[in-house]
Amino acid sequence: MELQDTIDNVDRQLLDLLQQNAAISNQSLAEQVHVSPPTCLRRVRRLHDLGLIEKQVALLQPERLAALQGHGLTAIVEITLDQQGAEFLNAFESRVKTDEQVQQCWRVSPGPDFILVVHAHDMPAYHALAQRLFTHDANVRNVKAFFATHRAKFDTRVPIRLE
């Protein structure tokens, strides 16, 4: 059975609503999708079990957090490897995934092999990350970093097609 055959429009509505506010009460969620609270809870648990809901997190407001601990530094980094065999791509990906300063890691094509979104406390912290992840790796051929000056949009929501 295909995954799309296992969810219906109520499940899609639940996914859409939970992306907007994962802290919504089960009662309110049930009311909005017109099912009973026990049915709603059972459906949400099933969406977790199917792996459609990966995890629930709190999204922090960077400007307000900056007032408490400093702005930090966000960089979008292009990485090109010298050798692109599967074992080299997997090795690089495994290494950067374990670094907490790497917020996102994307394999891309064409162009560079990876795009990373990195958040560091300051430029010395970014430099240490670059040494650790890029400079010490003999297979990294090219690194191109773009430093963010303003965040115009940030959204984690995946569009859900409702029927």
Image (spheres, rainbow, N blue to C red):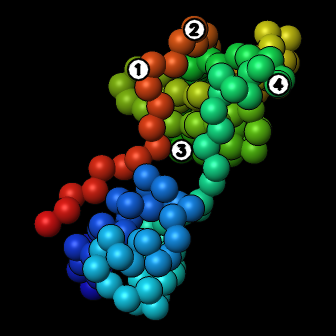
Crowd around label 4: few <14 · some 14–19 · many ≥20 (10 Å)? few
**Real-space Cα distance between discs 3 and 2?**
34 Å
Q: Which mark is residue 86?
A: 3
Q: Which residue is mark 4?
A: 68
Q: Could you say whether the residue bearing mark 3 is in a helix, strand or loop?
A: helix
Seen at 65% across and 38% down, the residue is 60
**Real-space Cα distance between discs 1 and 2?**
24 Å
Query: Disc 4 vs disc 3: which is toward the camera?
Result: 4
What amino acid is labelled 2 in the image? Thr
Q: Which residue is mark 2?
A: 149
**Real-space Cα distance between discs 1 and 3?**
17 Å
Crowd around label 1: few <14 · some 14–19 · many ≥20 (10 Å)? few
In x, y percent, where is residue 138?
73, 22
In x, y percent, where is residue 15?
38, 64
Of 114 and 87, nearer the camera is 114
Instruction: Quadrant for residue 131, please give it.
Output: top right
**Real-space Cα distance between discs 1 and 4?**
38 Å
Seen at 68% across and 43% down, the residue is 97
**Real-space Cα distance between discs 2 and 4?**
19 Å
